[in-house]
Image: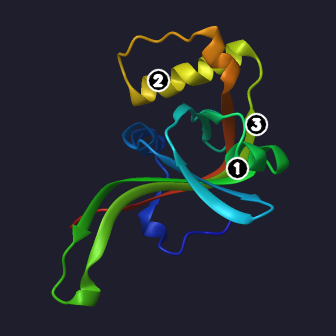
């Protein structure tokens, strides 16, 4: 993996990665199909296992069983992921001295559709726990039948932070 140009902004602390995963609500997924590259923003759930080699992030998403996203994932499971939070303009004395504060995670991984009911329920529960903490969670069988549930194993990623002065 290519080194970060502004290495002083690189995040290496697993606790900060966990904070970003918890704070963000949307992951942008880059994929490619016969029409070219595209990005789709989706809500997500996650497992974060820093004890796994390379700091392990697993993302869970859901959607329709048919359509561009599902077709692209089936044809080419390689994806890019990006999420960011803590957005704030950093003012300067002149136009080009302005900047932007943020935290972000960017990486790449592979996506697969979950087909086992237990895996689907686990993934959907993770999404609900992240997006609606404390909500009552139950899944009707007919809902599970018509929903595509995906797991993204993030194989390589970096984190970056620009703090406001």
Where does residue 49 sit, x and y in percent of width and height? 58, 32
Quarter of the image with the C terminus is bottom left
Q: Which residue is drawn at 29% across and 62% down?
A: 163
The quarter of the picture where residue 25 lies is top left
Q: Specify few, some or many for label 2: CA neighbours under 10 Å numbering under 14, 14-19, or 20 or more.
A: some
Where does residue 66 sit, x and y in percent of width and height? 72, 39
Left-right relation of 91 to 9: left
Left-right relation of 159 to 108: left
Residue 112 image label: 3
Camera-nearest label, 3 or 1: 1
Tell which circle, 1 or 2, labels the residue nearer the N-terminal end.
1
* Whether residue 80 can be seen here: yes
Q: Residue at x 77, y 22 (%)?
A: 115
Tell which circle, 3 or 1, labels the residue nearer the N-terminal end.
1
- Label 1, on which residue? 68
Q: Residue at x 64, y 61 (%)?
A: 38
Location of residue 93 with respect to 64 vertically, above or below: below
Q: Is mark 2 on a helix, strand or loop?
A: helix
Q: Specify few, some or many for label 3: CA neighbours under 10 Å numbering under 14, 14-19, or 20 or more.
A: some
Residue 128 image label: 2
Q: Is mark 1 on a helix, strand or loop?
A: helix
Where does residue 35 sit, x and y in percent of width and height? 76, 64
Q: How many dots with numbers?
A: 3
- Residue at mark 1 to residue at mark 2: CA–CA distance: 24 Å
Location of residue 163 with respect to 57 vertically, above or below: below
Quarter of the image with the N terminus is bottom right
Q: Is mark 3 on a helix, strand or loop?
A: strand
Tell which circle, 2 or 3, labels the residue nearer the N-terminal end.
3
The quarter of the picture where residue 70 lies is top right
- Residue at mark 3 to residue at mark 1: CA–CA distance: 15 Å
């Amino acid at each position: 993996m290519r080194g970060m140009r502004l290495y002083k902004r690189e995040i290496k602390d697993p606790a900060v990665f966990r904070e970003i995963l918890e704070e963000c609500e949307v992951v942008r997924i880059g994929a490619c199909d016969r029409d070219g590259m595209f990005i789709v923003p989706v809500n997500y759930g996650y497992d974060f296992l820093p004890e796994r080699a390379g700091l392990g992030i697993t993302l869970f998403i859901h959607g329709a069983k048919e359509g561009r996203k599902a077709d692209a994932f089936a044809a080419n499971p390689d994806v890019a992921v990006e999420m960011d939070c803590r957005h704030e303009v950093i003012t300067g004395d002149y136009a080009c001295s302005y900047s932007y504060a943020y935290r972000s995670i960017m990486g790449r991984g592979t996506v697969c559709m979950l087909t086992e009911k237990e895996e689907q329920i686990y993934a959907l529960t993770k999404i609900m726990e992240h997006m609606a903490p404390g909500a009552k969670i139950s899944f009707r069988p007919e809902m599970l039948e018509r929903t595509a549930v995906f797991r993204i194993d993030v194989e390589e990623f970096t984190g970056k932070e620009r703090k406001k002065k």
